[in-house]
Amino acid sequence: MAGVTAATAHRRRAHGASAGRPWGVAPTALLLLGAIYCLFPVVWVLIAATKSPGELFSTSTLSFGTGFFDNVAELFAYRDGVFWLWAANTLFYAGGGALLSTAVSAVSGFALAKYRFRGRNAIFNLLIGGILVPAVVLAIPQYLLFSEIGLADSHWAVLLPQILHPYGIYLARVYAAAAIPDSLLEAGRIDGAGEGRLLSRVALPLMVPGMVTIFLFQFVAIWNNFLLPFIMLGDDGKFPLTVGLYTLLAAGANQPALYNLILTGALLSIVPLIALFLTMQRYWRTDLSSGAVK
C-alpha cells in the first residue's frame, strides 16, 4: 500500500513539473530540427553516390542505388586519377596550413597571455578586428600581392595566407591564460630555465588540448576552402578537391554522366574529416583541468 502511494505521489510530482514547464521540450525539438537540417544533405549525398547514371534521375530521392562501386572506380580512373592528385593537394594545404597555423597561434597566444610589453593590447585588439573581416574581402588583395612577387598559381599562394589566423591566436591566448599558471613559469625561471625552454617544456605541453582544437578548426576550414584556391590557381594540377569537383560540376552541364562522379567525390571528401574528428576527439574534449598544477 505504501509503495502504491509513493508511486502515485511520484507521478503527481512529475505531472506537476511537466505542467509547470510547458515549453520544456522546445529546446530539444529545436536541436533535433537543427540536426536534421545539417545531416540531411550528408544523407542525400550518401544515397545519391550509390546510384548509377540511369538511377540518379529516375529513382526516388531517398532510395539507394546499385552503382556505388562502379562510380568509385570511374572516379579514380577519370583523367588518369586526377582525383588522387586533388586529394593530395588538399591534404598538403590543409595539413601543412593547419600545422603551421597552430604553431604560430600557440606561440603568439602564449606571448600575448603571459608577457607584458608595450602595444600588447593594441595587437590583441587588431587581431580581434581581423576576426571580423570576411575572407572574401582579402582574397583579391592577396592575389594581387602574390602576383607581384611571382607566387600566384603556386602551392604557396594557397598555403601561406592560411598560416596567420586571428581566431586561432585569440583561442590560444584565452587557453594559455587559463591553463598556464604564472607561478609555474616563475618557478621555472627561478630554476634557471630560459624563455625558450619554458615555452617548449612547460607552456606547449599544457596547451595541447587547445592546440588540437585550433588544428581541427583550421584543418576543416582549409579543407573546405574554395574561394582562395579558386582565385589563386589556374593549373588544375594544383587544385584542391573543392575546386576540382567544381570543375567537374561545370563540365557536367555537357556531360551528365559526370554528376555521379561529383557526388561520389563529394562523399569521399567528407571521410577524412570524419576520421580526423573521431581519432582526435579525445584531445579536444579535454577540459582546462588538464593544465592544473599537480
Image (tube, rainbow, N blue to C red):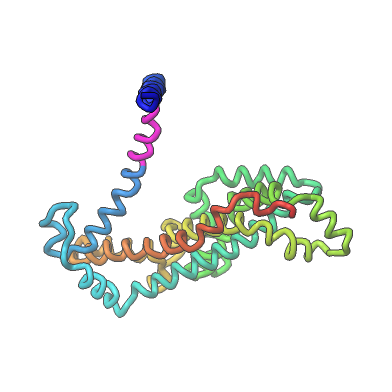
Nearer to me, 77 or 272: 272
Residue 90: percent from the left, percent from the top? 44, 67
Query: Which region of the structure is painted magenta?
Result: 23-34
Q: Is residue 64 left or right of residue 195?
A: left
Residue 240, given in percent of the width and then of the height, sits at 41, 66
Quadrant in which the N terminus is drawn = top left
The main secondary structure of the magenta stretch is helix
Image quadrant of residue 211?
bottom right
**Looking at this view, is 209 or 92 the one in front?**
209
**How many numbered discs sit on the rendered protein?**
0
Q: Is residue 70 left or right of residue 293?
A: left
Q: Determine the residue positioned at 74% across, 61% down.
A: 202
Answer whether residue 145 is visible to the viewer in this image.
no
- Magenta stretch holds residue 174: no
Q: Relative to 131, say whether 161 is above or below.
A: below
Write down the quadrant of residue 54 in the picture: bottom left
Q: Residue 252 at x, y = what percent?
A: 22, 63
Q: Quadrant of the C terminus?
A: bottom right
Along the line of sight, the residue nearer the viewer: 64 or 87: 64
- Looking at the image, the residue that sits furthest to the front is 1
Query: In this picture, is 84 found above or below 217?
Result: below
In the image, what residue occupies the spot 25% across and 64% down?
251
Give 19 or 45, whichever is nearer the viewer: 19
Question: In this view, which residue lies farthest toward the bottom?
Answer: 80
User: Which residue is at 83% across, 59% downward?
Assistant: 188
Is 65 left, or right, of 189 in this rendering?
left
Can I make out residue 238 in this image?
Answer: yes
Residue 109, position in %: x, y? 68, 53
Q: Is residue 25 magenta?
A: yes
Q: Residue at x 12, y 56 (%)?
A: 59
